[in-house]
Image: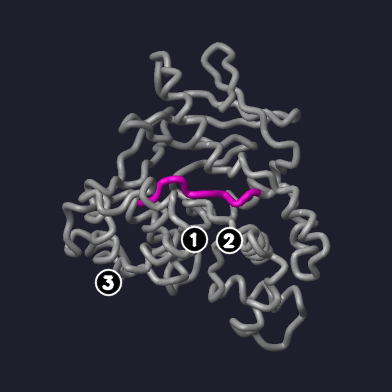
Amino acid sequence: MTWDKVENDIILTLPSDFNLESNLGYLTRERNECLYEVDNHTITRIITIEDISFLTQLSFTEDKKLIIHFLNTTKTVEDRQINKIVQYIRDWFDLDNDLTPFYEMAKKDFILNMPVEKFKGLRVIGIPDLFEALCWGVLGQQINLRFAYALKRQFVEKFGDHIEYEGKIYWRFPSYKLIAQLTPDDFSDIKMTIKKSEYIIGIAKLMDNHELSKNQLLPMSLKDAEKRLTQIKGIGPWTANYVLMRCLRFSSAFPVDDVGLINSIKLVRHMESKPTKNEILTLSTPWENWQAYATFYLWRLLY
């Protein structure tokens, strides 16, 4: 993992095909996002390393550099901590993935050709923290995106920590250790169902008891990781594949029953009715090993 340091700033080199507008377009698709702020091509968010919260400001240069600036500390950030922060950012933007084979496949594919031409340089923006990814998957079940963001904000502002800097508040996602100690009654003023609160508490307890972790799942095959996740109450195939895509980085993860995916394929193919699951599986045969990216680009068409 390479990075350069200039005074107190860390500098990363971005992949040559990284498209800033495409990625920021995704990050700003919903104004009610509460875990980061995007302003004038600059991202500000808390990154937590070893229970220490660093308020980071990420800015981008025209020569494909990403500059990490620390806002809330006067102490020197140790190299060990910098390495973990850099890894978090590389994971968040999937910077270590060479997309050349995906683009070569997509330009020949009659479904992917248009979205890839439109958004080329977009990465699958990740959710590096497993608990956050699982919670977001549960929160988003069977509701529209705008309401899901409203629920996330209520959840984060009730149970999360924050840093105040220059008159603004920046939020950190709640820890599973805290949520594991709660009951559904503690969620009573959040507009989520009792079932969802039970699912989130159950996930937190599994993680707090060391029965579930990202490190346990990463070495598994896609099928084994999906099977493990779907054994958890409240996690079905859609949520499992969502987490496999955006947190565990399985490039073959495929939420085939996703409504957005179905609507995007219908849109691109000018279909009068929605494609069936079997039709989608047939159409996606050329996407082998790139189903996650294919899905993400098709989702992007709907925003």
Pick the front one: 13 or 282: 282
Q: Mark 3 points at which residue?
A: 195
Q: Which residue lies furthest to the bottom in this view?
A: 273
Disc on res. 222? 1
Q: Position of residue 228 (x, y in %)?
A: 36, 63
* Amino acid type assigned to the residue bearing label 2 in the image: Ser
Q: Is mark 1 on a helix, strand or loop?
A: helix
Which circle marks residue 252 in the picture? 2
Task: Tell me which label, 1 or 3, sits earlier in the chain.
Answer: 3
| Spatial separation of the CA atoms under disc 2 and disc 3 | 29 Å
| Mark found first going from the N terminus, 1 or 2 | 1
Q: How far apart are marks 1 and 2 (CA)?
A: 8 Å
Of tags 2 and 3, the one toward the viewer is 2
* Chain part drawn in magenta: 123-131
Check residue 96 in the rendering and tell me which mark sits there, or answer none: none
Q: Which of marks 1 and 3 is in front?
A: 1
SS of the residue under disc 2: loop
**Image x and y of residue 265, in percent:** 69, 74
